[in-house]
Amino acid sequence: MLIGSNGLHIVSATPEHYESLLANSSEAVGAALCSAASAETFMRFIATGPAIALLNADRVIAVGGIWTADGGKVGTCWLLTSQEFGAYAKTALRCCRNMVAMAHEEYGMRRVQALILADHERNRRFAQACFLEWEGNMRCLAPDGTDMALYSSIRRPK
């Protein structure tokens, strides 16, 4: 699907998109283990929930989605970006906002969350711009012992 006038396309994410992004990735944003996440972890993310790739021609700009592990009522956002991501951040933001809304409305998730390294201020602002609210910091959660910030969007069942 073509989005915007900047030549970007959205497609369903595949392991190949992730692999092609690895050589040019800047950081993992909002992933459960952030930059410490392994290729195997991201392959599971792609397989267990909605996941998209943002492409410009044949270049992968970002791969992201929402993985579930509890029967689908709680989803965790993840995003891996290329060095070019900043040039497309507004478009990617719209995609991420739509994914959060879709998780609630189409997948019936009551909670959509993101774990972000607590000292990554830019990534925290991105989560807030996706309408995720800061819940607090989780001390010593990342594999290297750094703190993680927890953000979420909640839709209570009616």
Image (tube, rainbow, N blue to C red):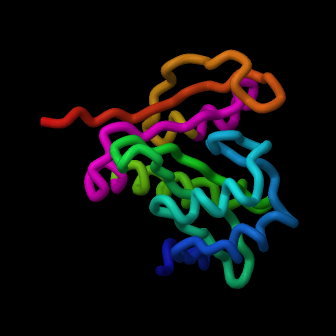
How many numbered marks, from 0 up?
0
User: Seen from this angle, which residue lies furthest right?
Assistant: 23
User: Seen from this angle, which residue lies furthest left?
Assistant: 158
Residue toward you, 128 or 157? 157
Q: Which residue is drawn at 59% across and 49% down?
A: 78
Residue 2: image location, x then y, percent: 50, 80
Q: In this view, does 39 lie above or below 152?
A: below
Q: In this view, does 57 lie above or below 151?
A: below
- Residue 3 left/right relative to 83: left
Residue toward you, 68 or 53? 68
Residue 17: in magenta span:
no
Residue 27: image location, x then y, percent: 78, 48
User: Seen from this angle, which residue lies furthest bottom?
Assistant: 57
Quarter location, residue 20: bottom right
Residue 19: image location, x then y, percent: 77, 70
Residue 49: image location, x then y, percent: 46, 59
- Residue 59 left/right relative to 4: right
- Residue 76 left/right relative to 85: left
Q: Which residue is drawn at 51% across and 30% down?
A: 151
Q: Residue at x 36, y 48 (%)?
A: 71
Q: Is the C terminus in the top left, top right, bottom left or bottom right quadrant?
A: top left
Q: In this view, does 31 lie above or below 140?
A: below
Q: Residue at x 31, y 56 (%)?
A: 107
Tell me which segment is drawn in magenta.
102-126
Residue toward you, 128 or 44? 44
